[in-house]
Amino acid sequence: MTNTELILAIDQGTTGSTCLLVDASFRVHGRSTVEFPQHFPRPGWVEHDADELWSSVITALEQALSAASADASQIKAIGVTNQRETSLLWDRATGTPLHRAIVWQDRRTAERCAALRAAGHEDRVRETTGLVLDPYFSGTKLAWVLDNIEGARARAEAGELAAGTIDTYVLWRLTGGDVHATEPSNASRTMLWPLRGGGWSEELCALLGVPLATLPRVHPSAHPFGETRGVAGLPDGIPICGIAGDQQAALFGQACFSPGEAKCTYGTGAFVMMNTGSEIVPSKHGLLTTVGWQLGEATTFCLEGSSFMAGAVVQWLRDQLGFFSSAAEIEALARTVEDAGGVVLVPAHAGLGAPHWRPEARGLIRGLTRGTGRAHIARAALEGIALQITDLLDAMAADLGKPLAGLRVDGGAAANNLLMQIQADLLGLPLQRPTMLEATALGAVSLAGLGAGLWSDTTALRDAWVQDRAFDPHGNAEAIAELRAAWTKAVALA
């Protein structure tokens, strides 16, 4: 065991929690990912048990320390990154959740969003928050719990309940219930946070039915949020110094610090995000305008497009259809055919996100013949993931008035070389893949290091970015045009 000082990154994701122990030179000493159960009580509903989620964090921490042969006393700062819109409410006195966390993929508030849209509120929500009225975001999820758990609304208005996204809950648990706080990248995903500042919007809280008394304090993304207290496996007093939502953390971890730089993270969903600097760029093509991060008084804004199913499509083929036993096997299976044989798979299992915003859409496979095999469907799944991203990049280019010059990629599915090549061919853009695919965790480490004063600015973070491989486009233009036309028809039917 060495005496190296370490930063702990807690990456709390949709299907599992990852802990990484990283030194000041960004060398990973230990990592562990622990999955936890997903709960699907009704069609379109997705939930997490908060205790199962927290248990996965603690187990991942124990395993990462063991892998690093490190002692917890070596941890000098903690950074947290998280699945963003997933939210829950809990009792301030006991810490007991009122209900399972409602996951970002959950569609139960689609009717509520449609009613708000029909009442003419969407333009105001978009103007204020940069978001669209969609069940993806946290505000209507929190209101659903308050309206469906007996006595919850009265308790919330009395200040007895705490609400938050998952970073807020993890911070609460890390500090033994001392700190109820978040930061702007997560706050901006609630439909309750104005992009132009001023704190939580009383107008939107009233519109969505979320009492201000439940909401956390909001600090900059690199900030001394609090210190550990009563956490199994950790000594008291370790500062938590950096927090950001997973996609913003990935953009930060990819060193996209300048306006115009962009990344795509291929995780459970897939998310394109581009830095627009201090400029708030309203989208006219179905994208979101959101906060990237806040350092000191300076806020960086972004354009973002999200697809709800990416790696989750591969999991579906594995778990529900039994195509393979490991998600990594999809690449070898898809390579056994030259193309998808006319099959198009639209991964709309949880609705369509940007730029379509159709929560009622459902997954679709089109073009099956007697000759269609598992390999064709597997390849169509990879193409479906990449085609969604192509739609998002087209919308981003339209908002900017010019195409992007390139794209950095990360996330677990970015390890799939075939998917990355398909993506480069469809976009006609070079892709850059870093050596460290866990860019979300790297972003959490970077923010924590800044918050703890290990680095004075982002220069060292940019220098630490190392490319693993580039993917240059070399697809057949005619075949790509045919595939995109078939995709457009299939999306209309989903």
Image: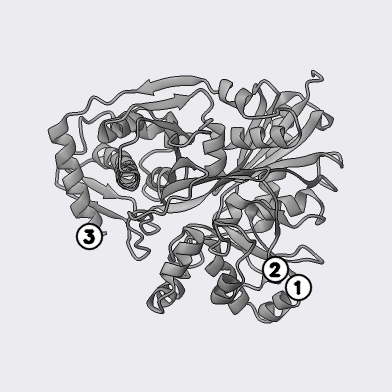
Dot 2: few (<14), some (14–19), or many (≥20) neighbours within 10 Å? Answer: many
| Image spot of residue 416 (x, y percent) | 39, 30
**Image quadrant in which the C terminus is located:** bottom left
On the rendered structure, is 255 left or right of 392? right
Answer whether labels 1 and 2 touch (C-beta < 8 Å). Answer: yes
| Amino acid type, callout 1 | Gly
Dot 3: few (<14), some (14–19), or many (≥20) neighbours within 10 Å? Answer: few
CA distance for labels 1 and 2: 6 Å
| Amino acid type, callout 2 | Thr
**Callout 2 secondary element:** helix
| Image spot of residue 121 (x, y percent) | 44, 73
Identify the residue under disc 2: 214
Dot 1: few (<14), some (14–19), or many (≥20) neighbours within 10 Å? Answer: some
Residue 437 shows in the view: yes
CA distance for labels 2 and 3: 41 Å
**Callout 1 secondary element:** loop
Among the two numbered marks 3 and 1 on one chain, the one whose residue lies closer to the N terminus: 1
Residue at the extreme top: 2
| Image spot of residue 192 (x, y percent) | 57, 64
| Amino acid type, callout 3 | Leu
Residue at 86% across, 39% down? 235
Identify the residue under disc 1: 159
Identify the residue under disc 3: 493
On the rendered structure, is 144 left or right of 385? right
Residue at 35% across, 41% down? 323
Q: Nearer the viewer, mark 3 or mark 1?
A: 1
